[in-house]
Amino acid sequence: MKKYSMILWLLSIFMASCKIDPQPIAYGTDGCHFCSMTIVDKQHASQIVTHKGKAFKFDAVECMMNHLNDIGTDQISLFLVADYSRPGEFLNAMEAIYLISPDIPSPMGEFLSAFGTQSDLDKILSEHDGDQLNWEQLKLRFKI
């Protein structure tokens, strides 16, 4: 019976450690995996989670993209970006709409922001100039 309990316990530890979920970002404390800056901007943060459940946090979408340039995308299960219109909320990066606008600075100077809906992006575009991109166009821009 002890052996069975030990196996069950080890199995539950193994299963919990491989969970494919994002981790909360501790703004003002967590550092960017790519550039090491402290993550403070809730409108531009991003995160990837590998197939093994390891989460990497970034202070800007451009840091995430530059990191993907180094490692590729085959080992990633989740690509998440902060919704500019809803600070602190994350979107599936592959479904987000991106804006590069010289009027909206991002932490690493690419002026790159993500939006969850076209209407949210259109509101910003009515006030600011910029170029709209989808996930595939963003990957091309960063040569991924």
Image (cartoon, rainbow, N blue to C red):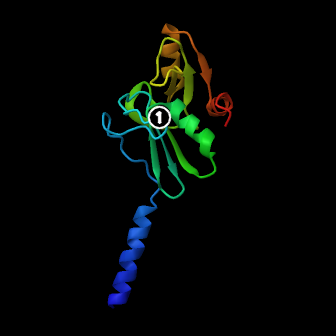
Image x and y of residue 30, in percent: 35, 40
For the point 54% across and 56% down, the residue is: 51
Q: Quadrant of residue 57?
A: top left
For the point 38% across and 86% down, the residue is: 4
From the image, which quarter does the N terminus lie in?
bottom left
Image x and y of residue 70, in percent: 61, 42
Image x and y of residue 86, in percent: 39, 28
Closest to the observer, 10 or 37: 37
| 32 relative to 20, above or below | above
From the image, which quarter does the C terminus lie in?
top right
Numbered marks: total:
1
Provide the secondary structure element on which disc 1 rests: loop
Other-residue count near label 1 (Cα within 10 Å), few / some / many at <14 / 14–19 / ≥20: some
Question: Does any portion of residue 19 appear in the rendered image?
Answer: yes
Give the amino acid at mark 1: Cys
Closest to the observer, 117 or 86: 86
Q: Quadrant of residue 41?
A: top left
For the point 57% across and 49% down, the residue is: 76
Q: Among all residues in the image, which is located at the extreme front? A: 36
| 131 relative to 22, above or below | above
Question: Does any portion of residue 95 appear in the rendered image?
Answer: no
Q: Among all residues in the image, which is located at the extreme bottom? A: 1
Disc 1 target residue: 35
Image x and y of residue 111, in percent: 52, 19
